[in-house]
Image: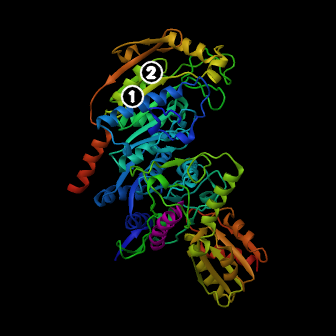
Amino acid sequence: MAVGHPLDPYLRTDRLPTMWCPGCGLGVVLGTLLRAIDRRIREGRLRRENVAFVGGIGCSARMTLYPLFDSAHVIHGRAIPFALGVKIVKPKMKMIVVGGDGDIAAIGGNHILHALRRNADLLVVMANNMIYGMTGGQLAPTTPRGLYTTTTPYGNPEREINMVRLAAALGANYVARGSTTHPQLLEQLFYKALAKRGLAFVEVLSTCPEIFGRHIDFRSPVDLYLELRKRIVVKAKPSVEESDYNWEKGFVIGEFVDKDEPGYIEVYLDYLSKALEKQPS
Amino acid sequence: MRYEYVTGNIAVAEASMTAGLKFYAGYPITPSSDIFEYLARELPKRGGHVVQFEDEIASINAAIGASWTCAKSMTATSGPGFSLMLEALSLAVITETPLVVVYVMRTGPSTGVPTRSGQYDVLQATYGFHGGLVIPVLAPSTPQEAYDLTIRAFNVSEELRTPAILLSDAVVAHTYGKVAIRERGEVEVVDRAKPSVPPESYRPYDPLDGIAPPMACFGEGYNVLVESLTHDEKGYYAPRTDAQRRLMWRLYRKVVESAERLFDYSAAYLDDCEFALVSYGPTALSARVAAKLLREEGYRACLVKLRTLFPLYEKGVRELLRGVGKVFVVENNVGLYFRELRGVLRDKEVISVPLIDLDVPPPQEIAGVVKEWL
C-alpha cells in the first residue's frame, strides 16, 4: 500500500502531481500554508468547511486547484473582490486569497489597495517570484532593477514595488514577508496570519528556476535556491522602515505589522445594524 | 400588490428585492446610480447587502463571489462600466454563476452624452464578452416592463445558471410610470437547484437530467470548485477537444434552447398588416405611434415590440411575421439589431431604420423614413 502524505486529507490527491516545474517554490508555499491550516483546525480555531481558497491567474493562483476546500480559480487580478463578495455574505468563512506578484501587485493593484484600506478580513498570500512565470518570463512590478526579463532584455530600468510598505501604509492588521528558503518561519507566519481579524498580508519570496533563474544565470533549482537564501535577511521584529526589498542589499523577512484593529466585516456589520435601527440620513 | 408612480430605475430596484436580491455591488455611473442609491437605503432593511466597490471590475467580481454563497446577486452599470465588466461576465458564463446585470444604456461611444439615451450597446450586451456564447438579454420600454423583466431576469438566471442582462436605457431609467409592485408570493420566483447528493458524489458541473447543474455553495462542506479553465463535470481542468466541445455546446444550448419559453413580445395592428415596424425599448413606443400615423394615412402598418432580444426565438419571429411583406427594424443606433433580424427573416425584405436621437426618435421621423421605402 502506498504511504500517504500527512497533508493528503487536505488535498485533491487525484489531481497530483501539481503542474509546477521541478524546483518551483510554490509547493513549499502550499505545504506550509496547509500545515498552518491543519494546526488551526486541530486547535478548533478553524472549521474546515469554512476555509476557502481564491486565486486569480498565474502559477501561484493555481494553488486553488489542489486543496480539498471550497475553491475558486477566477480571472486575472480579481481574486480579492470575489473573496470579499463571499466574506460579506458569509462572515464565518476564512477566505484565503493566493496569487502571484503579477496577480496581486500589478493587474490586481486597485483591489489590494482598497482591501488594505478597508482592513478587509482576508488572508492574502502573495507568492513573489519576481517574474511573470506562466507567460514565459516578462517584467513584473517586483522584478529587481537591472535584472533581465523577456520584455526588458537590456535590464529592467524600473523601480520595484515594496508590497510590505504598501500594506503597512494602508493599515493592514498583519503584514509579514517570508521566503520559501525558510519554511519553518513561513509556516509560523501563516499560522499567525490565520488567526487575525482584518487583512493579513503575507508576501512569500519564492524561486522560479525555469523562468526567472534562466535569465539571470541560475538555471539549476538548487543554485537559484541558494542564491535567494544568500540574499535573505531574517529579522525578529523588523520595522516597516527596515523592510528592504533589494537584490543587492537583500530582502528582509519577518513580521512587520501585528495590530488588532477591527476588520472591515465588524465595521460593516455595525453599519448594517443601523439600517435596522433608524432611518438613513 | 400596490401601485406606485416611479421611474424605471426604481422599478428595477423594487423588482430585484421581490425577486430575492441579497447582494448588490456597484460603482456609480450615470444613468444607473439611482438603482444603487435606492437599494443602499432599502435592501439592508430586508437583510441584504449593498456595497460600493473601487470600480466596476471589483463590483461584478464581488457579485459573482456572493452568488457562490447562493445569495442572489446583481450589479447595475452603463456602457463604460459594462465594458470593464466583460471579462468577469465571461467568468460567470463558464462557471455558470447566476447573476443579473442591469445595463442602463446611454449615448456613446466612450463618454458620449452620459445623461442621454441610445441603443448602441444592444449587441455588446450579449456578444461583448469573450468566448462566443449567448446570454439572455431582456429589454423593457416602460417602468412596468422594467419591473416585470427584472424579476424574469432573476428567474432565468437562477434556472439556467447564467448571467442575464436587463437592457434598459436612460429614457426608461428616468421616465415615471405607474408600476404594480408585488410582494413575494404574488409573483413566480425561481431559486437555483441545490444538490441532492452528499459531497462525496457531487459533481459541480454535471447537469444530471436538468437544464443546469445543481449548485452547491461556499461554506456547505461540498468543497466547491469555481473553475475558469475549461473543465469536466468534476470541475477539473480538461484541455481536450472533447471536453471543450461538451462544455461549449452545453453552455450554448441551455440558453438558446430556452428561446421559445423566453420569447416575449407585444404587437399592434397585426391582423391586416402589410409591413411591420419591429422595435424594442422606448423606441418601440415611438414606433407604435408611427404605425398609427401610417395607418391614418391609409397604410396597413403594424408594430411588433420585442422584449426578449436574446436568445431570439427565430421560429417564433418568422411565424409572427409570416403574412407581412416588408419588415422595418427601428432602433436608436446605426442599425444593429437589424442584423439579427435580417439573418432570421431571410425570405423577407428587412429594412433598417436607424434613427440616432439623444432621447427617443420622434414618430413623425420614423413614419417619414418608412414611407420613403413604400
Q: Would you place residue B91 above or below residue A31 in this image?
A: below
Q: Nearer the viewer, residue B361 or B43?
A: B43
In the image, farthest residue toward the front: A1
Tell me which secondary structure the magenta stretch mostly adopts. helix
Residue B359, position in %: x, y?
55, 65
Q: Would you place residue A80 above or below residue A27 in this image?
A: below
For mark 1, give the secondary structure: helix
The answer to which quarter of the image holds residue B284 is bottom right
Q: Is residue B52 visible?
A: no
Q: Nearer the viewer, residue B369 or A216?
A: A216
Q: Would you place residue A19 above or below residue B322 in this image?
A: above
Residue A37, position in %: x, y?
38, 34
Q: Nearer the viewer, residue B59 or B191?
A: B191
Residue A31, position in %: x, y?
47, 29
Q: Judge left or right: residue B359 versus residue B329.
A: left
Q: Residue at x 61, y 68 (%)?
A: B309
Q: Is residue B258 visible?
A: yes
Amino acid type, residue under disc 1 in the picture: Phe
Amino acid type, residue under disc 2 in the picture: Pro
Q: Residue at x 36, y 20 (%)?
A: A255
Q: Residue at x 63, y 88 (%)?
A: B296
Residue A190, disc: 1
Q: Would you place residue B168 above or below residue A185 in this image?
A: below
Residue A8, disc: none
Q: Chain of mark 1?
A: A
Precedes in sequence: disc 1 or disc 2: 2
Q: Quadrant of the C terminus of chain B?
A: bottom right
Verify whether residue B170 appears in magenta: no
Q: Judge left or right: residue B207 versus residue A10.
A: right
Residue A102, position in %: x, y?
55, 31
In this figure, which residue is indicated by the disc labeled 2? A183
Residues shaded magenta = B144-169
